[in-house]
Image (tube, helix red, strand yellow):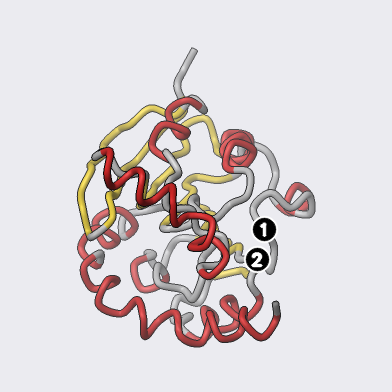
Amino acid sequence: MPIYENLFARFYDPIMHDFERSLFKKRKALFSNLEGTVLGVGEGTGANFKFYPKAAKIIAVEPSKPMLERAKRKDNHGNITYYNLGINDLELDKILDPNSIDSIVCSLVLCTIPDPDLALQNFKKWLKPNGRLVIIEHIHATKPINKSFQNLINPVWKVFSEGCNLNRNTDLLIKEAGFVPVEEEYFKRTLRFHSGVFELKTK
């Protein structure tokens, strides 16, 4: 719904302000040393922009036009190209060449992608042989009562949070797709989180 999409974009930053402050150090540690060409997946309202190095070339992909317009207001980087597309949109294959991306950044976005397995296969296709996937994602709880609660409310939650899934085992999906951790961490900020840097498994 266009009206709800606009409202969601308008109130996203105020609602997420305190939570984003809690992730500041982790975003800085993970994103501030990236080099070369960086693909930002689902960049939302541009929370990552302040952390990207000025020398890096940023390709920002975001399916929500209202979110993307708000992201552009935060652009003090000077080297960001914007695409109003979903990460599995076939149009991206006309834009991104195979083995052309140095780093792919996913922060609080793999929970929303309708087909995360396809997205991870696309990442493998676009990354250079020594490229890296850098992530901060919330994942399914481990305690049975919390897992059950997330499973129960997820259908409603997903509708009102623009496709966000509370119960996705993103950490497992990444590794099953053939990515191995260079560094990783599990932590809690109300929800359970997984962050880290991953490389493609070499044969």
> Residue drawn at (30%, 53%), measured in percent from left and top?
30
| In the image: residue 59, left or right of residue 17 | right
**How packed is label 1: few (under 14 Cα within 10 Å), some, or many (20 or more)?**
some
148 up-or-down from 51: above or below:
above
Residue assigned mark 1: 86
Label 2 sits on what residue type? Pro
> Residue drawn at (30%, 33%), measured in percent from left and top?
182
Where's the N terminus, which quadrant?
bottom right
Q: Position of residue 32 (x, y in %)?
A: 31, 60
Label 2 element class: loop
Give me the disc on residue 63. 2
> Residue drawn at (38%, 48%), measured in percent from left and top?
135
Question: Tag 2 or tag 1, which sits nearer the N-term?
Answer: 2
202 up-or-down from 123: above or below:
above
Q: Nearer the viewer, residue 149 or 87?
A: 149
Instruction: Kindly indicate whether the residue at mark 2 contacts the one at mark 1 (C-beta within 8 angstroms).
Output: yes
Q: Nearer the viewer, residue 114 or 43?
A: 114
Number of callouts in the render?
2
